[in-house]
Image (cartoon, grey):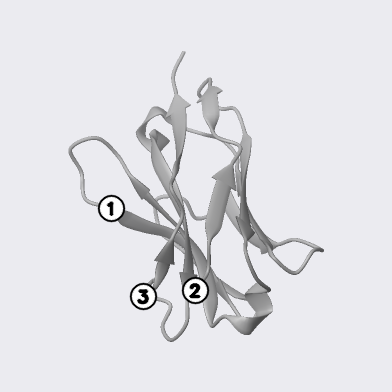
Amino acid sequence: QVQLVESGGGLVQPGGSLRLSCAASRSIFSLYAMGWYRQAPGKQRELVAVISGGITNYASSVKGRFTISRGNANNTVYLQMNSLKPEDTAVYYCTAHTRSVLAPDYWGQGTQVTVSS
């Protein structure tokens, strides 16, 4: 079992930045991958970014603006979000993967990100 707790969401103006944090209940280096998903109102949940063995992948909509990284502590993952757009508004979820980057096994409770002027 892995418990995930996200933090760092909030309200930001278009063009602004936020950094989301995810604290896991155990070392993330024992997991296959860590990721961030998001779900906007009325839309399906979508993969935003994933990191596995130091390799990162991003949704095309966020590539060049968002960066996923692992913290110095061995149980933290971050999502740095720059040049935010109103369409980035969503609940963001941290995920932990034990076997595949496309199949999360554990989810956090989510943190709201709202991009609005």
| SS category of the residue bearing label 3 | loop
- Which amino acid type is shown beneath numbered disc 3? Leu
Give the class, few, some or many, for how many residues have Cα within 10 Å of label 1's Cα (few <14, many ≥20): some
Q: Quadrant of residue 25?
A: bottom right
Q: Is residue 67 left or right of residue 48?
A: right
Tell me which numbered mark, 3 or 1, is placed earlier along the sequence: 1
Residue 86: percent from left, percent from top: 39, 28
**Residue shown at 47%/33% (left/top)?**
113
Give the class, few, some or many, for how many residues have Cα within 10 Å of label 2's Cα (few <14, many ≥20): few
Tell me which numbered mark, 2 or 1, is placed earlier along the sequence: 2
**Of circles 2 and 1, which is in front?**
2
Q: Is residue 111 above or below residue 61?
A: above
Q: Quadrant of residue 81?
A: top right
- Disc on res. 1: 2
- Which amino acid type is shown beneath numbered disc 2? Gln
Can you name the residue that lies furthest to the right here? 72
Q: Is residue 36 above or below residue 10?
A: below
Q: Quadrant of residue 23?
A: bottom right
Give the class, few, some or many, for how many residues have Cα within 10 Å of label 3's Cα (few <14, many ≥20): few
66 or 37: nearer the eye?
37
**Residue shown at 47%/82% (left/top)?**
98
- Mark 1, residue position: 45
58 or 111: nearer the eye?
111
- Which amino acid type is shown beneath numbered disc 1? Arg
Spatial CA distance of label 3 from label 2 is: 18 Å
Residue 66: percent from left, percent from top: 56, 50
- Disc on res. 102: 3
**Residue shown at 57%/80% (left/top)?**
31
Spatial CA distance of label 3 from label 1 is: 13 Å
Can residue 64 be seen from the camera position used here?
no
| SS category of the residue bearing label 2 | loop
Tell me which numbered mark, 3 or 2, is placed earlier along the sequence: 2
